[in-house]
């Protein structure tokens, strides 16, 4: 989760830097939306990290179901950015930024691990 959050922060920061280089209204709108989605992704991943126990054997601060919801929201945000840029035919400059981080793969892996915890009933 921490690696996914670090990469989400990097992607958000790169999107923010890129937004200064475009004057096209459509590209600016998509970038603004993606920046907001990645800000929310960082928040959802941070909530997940904050809910994890600080050390082995410590009490969790959230349920596995809560973590699954937050991780799912984070993944949806990244996919919404990617699909939105494709829908508006401006993916040429957003896709390299968000694809290079592999954040979707990391979050998907986190969802799989957490999903296994849900099926064992340790929520």
Image (cartoon, rainbow, N blue to C red):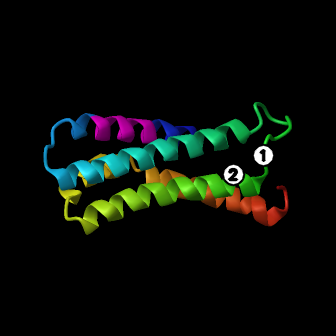
- Residue located at (37% from left, 44% from top): 35
First reached walking from the N terminus: tag 2 or tag 1? 1
Q: Quadrant of residue 15?
A: top left
**Marker disc for residue 67:** 2
Highlighted magenta segment, given as a residue range? 7-16
The picture places residue 75, in percent across and down from the top left corner, at: 50, 57
Tell me the chief SS of the magenta region: helix
**In the rendered structure, are the residues bearing label 2 and label 1 in contact, judged by CB atoms less than 8 Å apart?**
yes
- Residue located at (62% from left, 60% from top): 112
Decide whether residue 123 is among the magenta residues. Answer: no
**Which residue is nearer to you in this view: 66 or 19?**
19
Residue that numbered label 1 is attached to: 62
Q: Is residue 81 above or below residue 22?
A: below
Q: Quadrant of the C terminus?
A: bottom right
How crowded is the residue under tag 1: few (<14 C-alpha within 10 Å), some, or many (20+)? some
**Marker disc for residue 22:** none
**Which residue is nearer to you in this view: 46 or 21?**
21
Q: Residue furthest top?
A: 54
**Which residue is nearer to you in this view: 114 or 19?**
19
- Residue located at (53% from left, 53% from top): 74
Decide whether residue 15 is among the magenta residues. Answer: yes
- Residue located at (50% from left, 46% from top): 40
């Amino acid at each position: 989760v921490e690696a996914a959050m670090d990469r989400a922060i990097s992607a958000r920061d790169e999107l923010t830097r890129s937004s200064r280089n475009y004057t096209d209204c459509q590209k600016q709108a998509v970038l603004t939306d993606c920046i907001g989605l990645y800000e929310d992704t960082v928040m959802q991943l941070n909530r997940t990290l904050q809910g994890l126990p600080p050390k082995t054997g410590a009490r969790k601060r959230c349920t596995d179901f809560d973590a699954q919801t937050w991780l799912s929201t984070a993944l949806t945000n990244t996919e919404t950015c990617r699909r939105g840029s494709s829908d508006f035919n401006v993916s040429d400059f957003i896709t390299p930024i968000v694809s290079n981080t592999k954040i979707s793969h990391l979050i998907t892996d986190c969802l799989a691990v957490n999903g296994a915890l849900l099926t064992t009933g340790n929520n």
